[in-house]
Amino acid sequence: MLTPQAALIYAMVVAAESDREIADEEINIIGDLVNHLPIFRGIERRRVAELASACSEQLAGPGGVDQVY
């Protein structure tokens, strides 16, 4: 099960990849949000990258968005 912070990161990645491609600007926006919003206090930037990658892998797999948990 995802933490609330991880679920929010997944939601941002899913929205950013809704057109099948995520732009560098979108990645930067997600990073800025994580750096500034209080809910993400204490989460490491490396962890954000890991979560975003895991979400992208699930989106690219069979079932796509239906498999993102």
Image: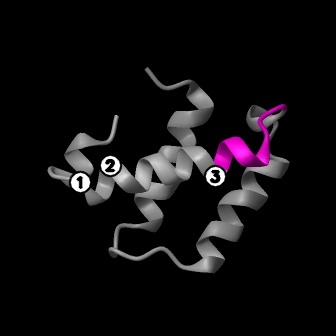
Counting from the top left corner in percent of width and height, residue 7 is at 50, 35
Instruction: Name the residue located 63 percent from the left edge and 68 percent from the top edge.
Output: 27
**Residue at numbered disc 3:** 49
Q: Magenta stretch?
A: 42-48
Q: Picture quarter containing residue 32?
A: bottom right
The kind of secondary structure element at disc 3 is: helix
Q: CA distance from mark 2 to mark 3?
A: 14 Å
Counting from the top left corner in percent of width and height, residue 21 is at 40, 77
Residue 61: which numbered mark, if any?
1
Q: Sequence-wise, which precedes: disc 2 or disc 3? A: 3
Counting from the top left corner in percent of width and height, residue 16 is at 47, 66
Quadrant of the frame with the C terminus: top left
Amino acid of disc 2 = Gln
Q: Are marks 3 and 1 in contact (CB under 8 Å)?
A: no
Quadrant of the frame with the N terminus: top left
Q: Residues within 10 Å of mark 1 (few under 14, many from 20)?
A: few
Q: CA distance from mark 2 to mark 1?
A: 5 Å
Residue 58: which numbered mark, if any?
2
Apparent side of residue 29 relative to residue 64 in the rendered image (left or right)? right
